[in-house]
């Protein structure tokens, strides 16, 4: 059994007063093994966040199934203890950590409250020790723990959001553009940290990003999403060096990097548009 088993997941948004429905997620299937980092890439509007939100129970699905750790995640929770248990097994890190951090509390207090809410510590001293361990885990110190969110840098705040997610010892962390707002060098540090945590704790990641270079640094496997559908998936290295789908080739060609060739972008875009306008061809 895989840690995550998503099958034929489907979600259509119907906007009142608008004739056009948006198929945000189109029969998507994938798995994540325990301790594996899987990238979910695709351009803006391709349905990445919708998939992430459905996995977290923040958005409903029209059809399909989501099993995490053997539990049907699309079934409604029956009571508080079930909700708490779900929260412990899957945690999310967003692009903007301010959503998860209370600006009135020191970040150490935020961590302490998360531990207490889930009864993961039974004394003040145990809480203090665990908070110190979590700060250390994301390479911050107790000095940072005494700071309020606004007193930290963007990278430090994102490390706290990661520590907050790890506090509950989840089996899966869903990261939605979690490093996208950080500058490149800070991005690299946070990605290193995520890789180290993955190796040491065996946590799995669903790592949502529009940025292939970032996905390449962290994810063993990747899924490419186009208009809600998975058009390609495989080992990240293979997907990026030998993309099979025209859309993946376009994404790869559009990513600036060593050997980047604007002419290839133009070629890839032409071949992609040609393919998309062939009548009846599915993405
Ligand atoms: N609550 C909603 N109501 C109506 N349409 C929605 C809703 N949420 C998402 N959509 C639509 O579903 C599609 C997929 O959106 P989603 O946010 O999943 O894309 P994304 O890949 O995360 O994009 P980005 O990279 O910009 O974050 C878009 O067309 C979006 O407009
Ligand atoms: Mg998104």
Image (spheres, grey):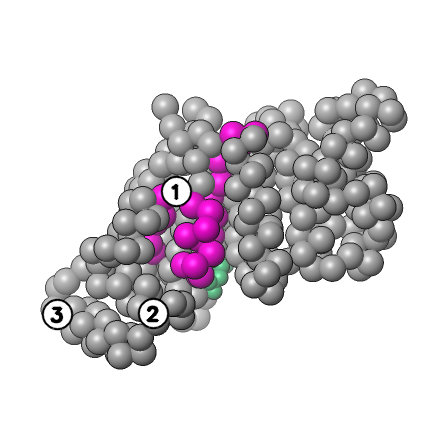
- Rounded to the nearest whole Å, what is the CA distance between mark 3 and mark 2? 31 Å
* Of the image marks 3 and 2, the number of the one nearer the N terminus: 2
The answer to whether 99 is drawn above or below residue 138 in the figure is below
* Magenta-span inclusion, residue 206: yes
The disc, 1 or 3, on the residue closer to the chain's N-terminal end is 1
Q: From the viewer's perspective, is 153 left or right of 183?
A: right
For residue 136, side relative to residue 219 (left or right):
right
Near mark 1 (Cα within 10 A), the count class, few <14, some 14-19 or many ≥20, is some
**114 to 238, vertically: above or below:** above
* Nearer mark to the viewer, of 3 and 2: 2
Spatial CA span between label 2 and label 1: 23 Å
* SS assignment at label 3: loop
In what element is the residue under mark 2? loop
Residue that extends furthest to the left in the rendered view of this protein: 279
Q: Nearer the viewer, residue 199 or 271?
A: 199
What residue did someone put label 1 on?
220
Is residue 63 at least partly visible in the picture? no
Which corner quadrant of the image does residue 91 belong to? Answer: top right
Residue in front for this viewpoint, 158 or 95: 158
**Magenta residue span:** 201-225
Which residue shows up at 64% across the image and 39% down it? Answer: 165
Whether the magenta-drawn stretch holds residue 46 is answered as: no
Gap between marks 1 and 3 measured at Cα: 33 Å
Ligand 1 closer than 8 Å to the CB at disc 3? no
Cβ of disc 1 within 8 Å of ligand 1? no
Residue at the disc numbered 3: 278
In what element is the residue under mark 1? loop
Task: Please state which of residues 162 and 283 is positioned toward the viewer in this rendering.
Answer: 162
For label 2, the residue is 259
| Viewer-nearest of discs 2 and 1 | 2
Can you tell which of label 1 and label 3 is closer to the viewer?
A: 1
């Amino acid at each position: 059994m895989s840690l995550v088993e998503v099958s034929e997941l489907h979600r259509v948004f119907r906007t009142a007063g608008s004739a056009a429905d948006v198929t945000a997620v189109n029969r998507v299937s994938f798995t994540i093994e325990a301790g594996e980092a899987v990238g979910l890439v695709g351009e803006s509007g391709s349905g990445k966040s919708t998939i992430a939100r459905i996995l977290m129970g923040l958005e409903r699905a029209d059809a399909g199934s989501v099993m995490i750790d053997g539990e049907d995640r699309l079934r409604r929770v029956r009571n508080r203890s079930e909700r708490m248990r779900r929260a412990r097994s899957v945690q999310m890190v967003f692009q903007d950590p301010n959503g998860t951090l209370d600006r009135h509390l020191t970040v150490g207090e935020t961590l302490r409250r998360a531990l207490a809410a889930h009864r993961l510590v039974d004394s003040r001293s145990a809480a203090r020790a665990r908070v110190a361990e979590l700060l250390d885990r994301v390479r911050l110190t107790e000095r940072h723990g005494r700071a309020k969110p606004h007193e930290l840098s963007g990278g430090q705040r994102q490390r706290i959001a990661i520590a907050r997610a790890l506090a509950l010892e989840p089996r899966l962390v869903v990261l939605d553009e979690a490093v996208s707002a950080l500058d490149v060098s800070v991005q690299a540090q946070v990605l290193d940290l995520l890789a180290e945590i993955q190796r040491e704790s065996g946590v799995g990641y669903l790592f949502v990003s529009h940025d292939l270079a970032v996905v390449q640094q962290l994810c063993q496997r990747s899924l490419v999403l186009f208009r809600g559908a998975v058009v390609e998936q495989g080992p990240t290295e293979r997907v990026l060096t030998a993309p099979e789908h025209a859309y993946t080739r376009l994404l790869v060609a559009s990513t600036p990097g060593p050997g980047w060739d604007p002419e290839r972008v133009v070629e890839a875009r032409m071949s992609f548009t040609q393919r998309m306008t062939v009548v009846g061809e599915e993405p």
